[in-house]
Image (spheres, helix red, strand yellow):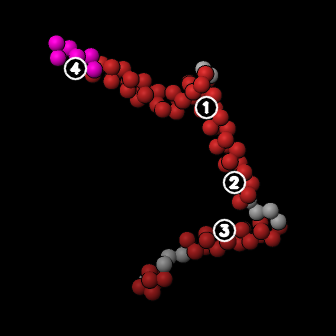
Amino acid sequence: MAQARLNLAVLLVLGVLAPCCFFGVQELAASAQAHGGIVGGFVGELKREHDEAEAAEIRDLAPQTREERQEAREQAEMAAAASSQPPEEEQEAG
């Protein structure tokens, strides 16, 4: 009898985990959203809020004036030049 309960418990756990492993968590969340209901509405609202916050952050961090854009371009060029040069220790040794 105990063995039958253990087998049943294992089957239940596998029954729950198998779809998660097969479809992945994101697909299950998307499926829940597509089917609506409380969970779907909640997931959809969280996604909309996240997307809006991300878009606002990108707008806030983007250079606004010509001077800011020029400064950002110069910093990017300096970083690219610095990364292409070997460190000073290697230059002295070489």
Q: Residue furthest right?
A: 66
- Write the residue at 64% across / 74% down: 78
Task: Check residue 57 in the rendering and tell me which mark sits there, or answer none.
Answer: 2
- Determine which quarter of the picture holds residue 39: top right
Dot 3 or dot 2: first in sequence order is: 2
Q: Amino acid at mark 2?
A: Glu
Dot 3 or dot 1: first in sequence order is: 1
Residue toward you, 1 or 79: 1
Q: Secondary structure at mark 4?
A: helix
The boundaries of the magenta stretch are 1-9
Q: Secondary structure at mark 3?
A: helix
Dot 1 or dot 4: first in sequence order is: 4
In percent of width and height, residue 68 lies at 77, 68
Instruction: Specify whether residue 5 is painted magenta.
Output: yes
Residue toward you, 86 or 37: 37
Foreground tag (2 vs 1): 1
**Mark 4 crowd level (few <14, some 14–19, many ≥20, 10 Å Cα):** few
- Write the residue at 22% across / 20% down: 6
Foreground tag (3 vs 1): 1
Query: What predominant SS class does the magenta segment belong to?
Result: helix
Instruction: Specify whether residue 21 is painted magenta.
Output: no
In percent of width and height, residue 43 lies at 60, 32
Q: Amino acid at mark 3?
A: Ala
Q: CA distance from mark 3 to mark 2?
A: 20 Å
Residue annotated with mark 3: 76
Q: Reply above or below: 64 against 4.
A: below
Task: Check residue 6 in the rendering and tell me which mark sits there, or answer none.
Answer: 4
In percent of width and height, residue 24 lies at 46, 31
Q: CA distance from mark 1 to mark 4?
A: 36 Å
**Mark 1 crowd level (few <14, some 14–19, many ≥20, 10 Å Cα):** some
